[in-house]
Image (spheres, rainbow, N blue to C red):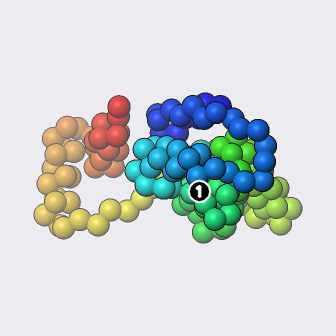
Amino acid sequence: MCVEINNVVAHFHRPHPRPDTDKGAIKSVRRFLENAGGDSMSVLTCKGYQGSFEYDPDADIFHGDVLHITDVITFQGRSIDELKTALAESIEVYIEYCAKKRKEPQKPFSGTFNVRLSPEIHQRLAMRAAHDGVSLNKWVAKTLEKAVSV
């Protein structure tokens, strides 16, 4: 079975189903998750939502929840494939529930955020934007786009 998270690829031998998992397999999954996410937590994306997950060796299961919203959406699975399916199903159930309650589902990001700066930095940024012939908002957006471009 091949899995890719954050551009890190792992190929795991799919063992025959049994109620226990050997410690070597658990170590391999842990190492993969650490390499893919910098720690034992990683992130999956589905329908614009991001779900963080981690492996619980005591329960022998991955569990996670959706990030960046105040509503709580959880998911779990015994494999990455099960985890992806569970995330998609949990998001779908959440959206259906919101529709039934006539509530707008929360979105992870609105495209707007506030930044607190010193007045001096604010002024220097505004002057730079004016020099470049664009609004401060447009200048900041372009600069941030460049910062996260690959």
How many numbered discs, if any?
Answer: 1
Kind of residue indicated by mark 1: Tyr
Mark 1 nearby-residue class (10 Å; few <14, some 14–19, many ≥20):
many
Task: Classify residue 90 as left or right of residue 12.
Answer: right
Q: Is residue 70 above or below residue 39?
A: below
Q: Quadrant of residue 150?
A: top left
Q: Is residue 29 left or right of residue 123?
A: right
The residue under the point 13% across, 63% down is: 120
Q: Secondary structure at mark 1?
A: strand
Of residue 17 and residue 62, the one placed in the foreground of this image is 17
- Where is 101 relative to 89, above or below? below
Residue picked out by circle 1? 55
Farthest right residue?
A: 100
Is residue 84 shown above or below 114?
above
**Residue at point 76%, 38% (across, down):** 16
Task: Tell me which corner region of the image, top left, top right, bottom left or bottom right, holds residue 101.
Answer: bottom right
Residue 61, percent from left and from top: 68, 57
Quadrant of the image containing the N terminus: top right
Q: Is residue 54 visible?
A: yes
Q: Does residue 33 appear in this view?
A: no
Q: Position of residue 131 (x, y in %)?
A: 15, 41
Residue at point 19%, 52% (across, down): 125
Q: Position of residue 51 (x, y in %)?
A: 60, 53
The answer to which of 2 and 73 lies nearer the viewer is: 2
